[in-house]
Image: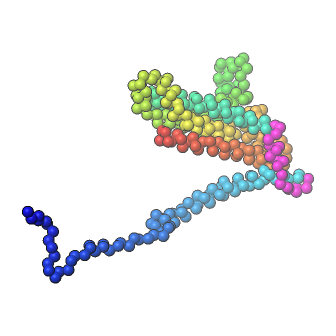
Amino acid sequence: MAVTTSETAPAPGAQAPGPPAAAPERRRATRRPGTGPHRRVLRWRWPAVVPFFAFMAVCFGLPAGTMAYNAFTVVDPGTGASEHSLENVRTALSGAYATGLWGSVQLSLLTAVFATVLGTLVGQAVLASGNSALRKAIVSASGVFANFSGAPLAFAFIATLGTTGTVTRLLELQRTGFSLYTFTGLVLAYLYFMVPLMVVTVLPALDGVRTQWREAAASCGASRAQFWRHVGLPVLLPSLLGGAVLMFGTAFASHATAAVMTGSSVPLITIQIANALSGNVLVGQENLALAMSLNMVVIALLVITVQIPLQRRSNRWLG
């Protein structure tokens, strides 16, 4: 039996077909590093940020450098000769100045804890109410109260809770031994603007707690307290800690309220710096004041260093 195939033999005298011709190789476009269109766009855009960096250098870098330089400079009041030394820094961290620094840290820590707890409770109560009009009113009022500080706040508290204040006479607070011009009075005054600030700060984080999480926890038999203990609070913890750090920095840098209310009766680092700069205690202590300011800057940098990672972690969960 003959087997037929689809292949046909070449005709006599015809040349046998060779292998298929290779396709012409395409030349790849080579691009040197840094010559792409994106690189060209960046090259033309970077001059736009020069004014920003110039502003930062003049308004922040120059004062900070001057402060750091003079903080380590000691001037002889008799001859006027100056030399570099650590005497100002050592003096700023000892004696009455160390007491003032520790007093500011205590006041900031206490008010930060109270403001964080109270602000979080108020914010959660507003969200739980489900009333949009109430939320708008609370947010608007918190924004106003958070910016009502300094000398106006001190005068308002003096007129209300001072020795002859309206509420003091109405409730006869003199019999309880209450005095506005003490550490306790400063705590009350600071909480007046720090609690609203915490409300504004924590509301976006509370909004990030999703309803699906609560429904999933409830479907598993978890109570509301168990949900907040095992899910809600762990998720909100970075935001709450970041808010507490922000409250600490706000209280630590406040000056006018304490200066008007208590003067020098409550030792605080901000009041001591003002007294040293104005020469109320000793003349020629400007560099000592700069050394105390340098201590405050170091603490502020530590606060910022702690707050930034907490804010990033909060955005990762609630963003």
**Numbered circles on residues, count:** 0
| Residue in the image at 65% along x and 24% along y | 166
Residue 80, magenta (yes or no): yes
Compared across the picture, whether 314 is left or right of 305 comes to left
Between 207 and 212, the one lying in front of the other is: 212
Which residue occupies the extreme right position in the image? 78
The region drawn magenta spans: 78-96
Between 153 and 272, the one lying in front of the other is: 272
| Residue in the image at 75% along x and 52% along y | 68
Could you say where residue 273 lies in the image, as x and y percent from the top left?
Answer: 76, 43
Could you say where residue 290 lies in the image, as x and y percent from the top left?
Answer: 76, 48
Which residue occupies the extreme left position in the image? 1
Q: Quadrant of the N terminus?
A: bottom left
Q: Picture quarter containing residue 238?
A: top right
| Residue in the image at 41% along x and 25% along y | 220
Q: Picture quarter containing residue 152?
A: top right
Compared across the picture, whether 124 is left or right of 159 comes to left
Residue 283, magenta (yes or no): no
Q: Is residue 129 above or below residue 300?
A: above
Could you say where residue 146 lies in the image, as x and y percent from the top left?
Answer: 58, 37
* Whether residue 178 can be seen here: yes
* Whether residue 277 can be seen here: no
